[in-house]
Amino acid sequence: MYNQLLGKLISRKESLSVIGLGYVGIPVAVAFAEKFNVIGFDLNEKKIEQYRSGTDPTKEVGDTAIQNTAVNFTEDEKALRKARFHIIAVPTPVKADHTPDLGPVESASEILGRNLCRGSIVVYESTVYPGVTEEVCVPILEKESGFQCGRDFKVGYSPERINPGDQERRFENITKIVSGMDQETLDIVADVYGTVIRAGVYRAESIKVAEAAKVIENSQRDINIAFMNELSIIFNKMGIDTRSVLEAAGTKWNFMKFYPGLVGGHCIGVDPYYLTYKAEMLGYHSQVILSGRRINDGMGKYVAEMCVKHLIEADRPVKNARVAIFGFTFKENCPDTRNTRVIDIVKELKEYGIIPLIFDPVADRREAEALYDVDFARKEEINNLDAVIFAVSHNEFKAIKADQMRGMFGRGRRILLDLKGIFDRKEYEDNEYMYWRL
């Protein structure tokens, strides 16, 4: 029953579905549509309408790819009954208390469960802590379908590794970890992904191993950035430029090149909490991982405090100061604002009575307004400023020239907080800017 599935997918006698068409799901769906019949399902009817009209709201694959793809976009869950290989790629965020929010993956499992057909294989790509696929998702699939896992359907796990906004590291050229509940499932999952992944697949020995591998990838990066952020705080107190220190240290062959910054998004700022949550369930309280999280979660407040200190040093009144924040997304050249830590800067500045003007031509404005209740400023409103904070290094911001920068400020000393080190520090300091970066 299962060993013929790949052949039927290739001959288009069977279909593959992708459930969740966001920054992860849409590149997956478009890639597989080159080889198989693909059903792209999402509950967001507005998003489905955009895809049908040839628009890519995620900007991950682009409008042209959407216009040319053969993906059957639908918000009708019953369409999933036509598929036998299912990929679930919904987000797994954290709640306000930093505990995992499995709601989206549980909901996707419920929807698929009530539309599951015998002989299907279900693969989860969502980032979870070890055990979620088999201990949380499988029971939901069984309950909703009335089927038995292992007899009527099988499951696998293949963690997403897509880097939103990265035009070089794409779905097809990133090594794909695959896993299955048994050898037969593993072989099929590996073969199916192998049809589109040019970089090859890595067969993990179990689903839990694959889940664990994914969750530590971003935890490792989070810890390293936390170290850089802590160094930045220390060196700032010493009057030393952190980036200059890192450039000097980077001349050693085995020095790892990480840089300080805001850590948000739906991966690096989230995944560590999934791992520590599971650890606490088992009686172990993380020390290193959560310490890094506390540092990174506090960087927005730290940046706002540095802005206030510079305003005071420049003899500018703090209350009602006009401060422009360039960039609101969680990373450069990507419209995604989910779990952006720029919002921490905005909230903290408001606590001081400062008027923050958010400007981001790349961000999904509607998403930002819905998630954070913020309004974006128009370009013509960015004037008569007391300070400017460049929080995200969009390409458009890198192109800003010194004369354009000068025109944004009012009278008095000009304060430039360049968090990502976009601009030449010496050039702006020579032009009497109060320049500061992490």
Image (cartoon, grey):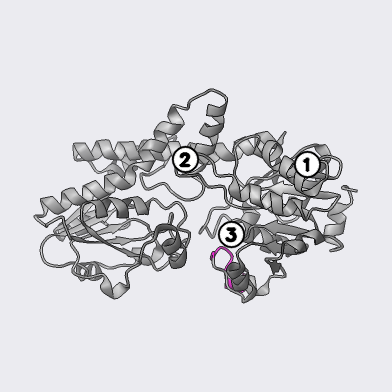
**Disc 1: which residue:** 186
**Three-letter amino acid code at the position of disc 1:** Leu
**Disc 2: which residue:** 98
Instruction: Check residue 333 for magenta coloring.
Output: no
**Three-letter amino acid code at the position of disc 2:** His
Instruction: Check residue 60 for magenta coloring.
Output: yes
**Disc 3: which residue:** 22
Residue 153 drawn at (x, y percent): 82, 45
Task: State the predominant SS element of the stretch in magenta.
Answer: loop
- Tell me the magenta residue range: 58-65
Residue 89 drawn at (x, y percent): 64, 53
Residue 298 drawn at (x, y percent): 34, 41
Q: Can you tell which of label 2 and label 3 is closer to the viewer? A: 2
Between the residue at mark 2 and the residue at mark 3, the CA separation in whole angstroms equals 22 Å
- Density class for disc 2 (Cα within 10 Å; few <14, some 14-19, many ≥20) is some
Between the residue at mark 1 and the residue at mark 2, the CA separation in whole angstroms equals 33 Å
- Nearer the N terminus, badge 1 or badge 2? 2
Q: Secondary structure at mark 2?
A: loop
Q: Nearer the viewer, residue 139 or 355?
A: 139
Q: Is residue 48 left or right of residue 223?
A: right
- Nearer the N terminus, badge 2 or badge 3? 3
Q: Visible in this render: residue 158?
A: yes
Residue 186 occupies quadrant: top right
Q: Secondary structure at mark 3?
A: loop
The residue located at (38%, 36%) in the rendering is 294
Q: Is residue 406 left or right of residue 143?
A: left
